[in-house]
Image (cartoon, rainbow, N blue to C red):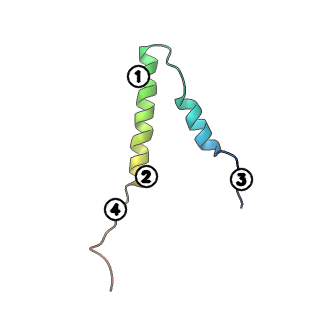
Amino acid sequence: MSKAKGTADKNLTNVAESLDQAAVNSHHAQQLNQDKNDRRHQDALNHDQPTDLTNQRS
């Protein structure tokens, strides 16, 4: 499968649109901030793959 060149990733576009909202009140602002923090935390978990150097075979 080949990807179309010159177009943005649909998932990335949807995430950017959902994070680019103006808060209606303080509760909504807190919810938007928590959503942003949750995404950052999940991204950190997805990229935390330390290399195991102790179990290498020769």
Q: Is residue 13 above or below residue 53?
A: above
User: What distance separates the C-alpha of mark 1 from that of mark 4?
Assistant: 33 Å
- Residue 34 position, x and y percent, is 41, 30
The amino acid type found where label 1 is placed reads Gln
- Residue 20 position, x and y percent, is 54, 28
Q: Nearer the viewer, mark 3 or mark 2?
A: 3
User: What distance separates the C-alpha of mark 4 from that of mark 2?
Assistant: 11 Å
User: What distance separates the C-alpha of mark 2 from that of mark 1?
Assistant: 24 Å
Q: Tell me the crowding category of disc 4: few under 14, some 14 to 19, or many 20 or more residues within 10 angstroms, Cα based.
A: few
Q: Is residue 51 above or below residue 46?
A: below
User: For the residue labelled by badge 2, is the local secondary structure a helix, a strand or a loop?
Assistant: helix
In which quadrant of the rendered view does residue 27 lie? top left
Q: Which mark is residue 46?
A: 2
Q: Residue at point 39% right, 50% down?
A: 45
* Tags 4 and 2 touching, CB below 8 Å: no
Q: Which residue is mark 3?
A: 5
Q: Residue at point 33% right, 83% down?
A: 57
